[in-house]
Image (spheres, rainbow, N blue to C red):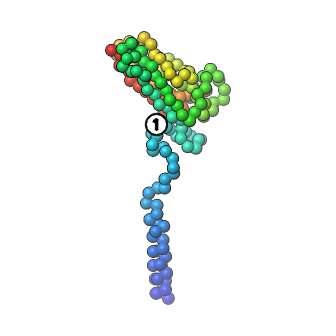
Amino acid sequence: MTRIAFWAITILLFACLPAAAQWKEPPATGSPANELPDRTTLAGQAGMGPLLAVNLVNAEENARNHKAVVQVQTDGVNIVDPSDKHEPKIDEVHIQYRMDNEPIQTTSAKTWTFDHLSSGNHLVRVALATSDDRQLGKERSLRVRVP
């Protein structure tokens, strides 16, 4: 009887080995989260959060003219008028622009110009916010050097 038990256990172990070795790496989910590091995960929403990409338009030329023009690209949200106060929705946002420690400018415009900048270094911050002005996702920042 022990010989039969030995062979039964041996066969069972060899049969289970391929299944145990199958998950040496976590299975791929098909999510492009690793390819898009600038998206954030939102609580309560399946999938990825909003994309917020910012850049300076003609950075050097505009800096010489003492201005900064910021261009925003978004995905995964609808841009709405910030003056339209309603129940916040996770997919409806407006854009918040801020230069240094100046007041926040809220708008639905994807391009914003800061004029009459003094010489020196400046920090532009851009964020997405819901209708109750709560920031959604990560803020982006750009540095501007005006000669």
- Residue 35 in which image quadrant: top left
* Amino acid carrying mark 1 in the image: Asp
Residue 132 placement (x, y as % from top left) = 60, 26
Count of numbered circles on the image: 1
Q: Tell me residue 65's x, y (percent).
A: 39, 12
Q: Secondary structure at mark 1?
A: loop
Which residue shows up at 49% across the image and 32% down it? 52
Q: Label 1: which residue?
A: 38
Residue shown at 46%/61% (left/top)? 23
Residue extending furthest bottom?
1
Q: Nearer the viewer, residue 25 or 1?
A: 25
For this rendering, which residue is in front, 21 or 88? 21
Report the quarter where the C terminus lies. top left
Q: Position of residue 69 (x, y in %)?
A: 45, 19
- Residue 137 shows up from this direction: no
User: Residue placed farthest to the right in the image?
Assistant: 86
Q: Residues within 10 Å of mark 1 (few under 14, many from 20)?
A: some
Whether residue 139 sits left or right of residue 131 in the image: it is: left
| Residue 62 sits in quarter | top left
Pick the residue in front: 79 or 16: 79
| Residue at image location 45% in from the left, 74% down from the top | 14
**Residue 124's spot in the image, x, y percent?**
43, 22
Can residue 44 be seen from the camera position used here? yes
Furthest residue in direction left, as rendered? 147
Q: Is residue 89 left or right of residue 144?
A: right
In this rendering, the answer to whether 19 lies above or below 102 is: below
Which residue sits at x=49%, y=53%?
28
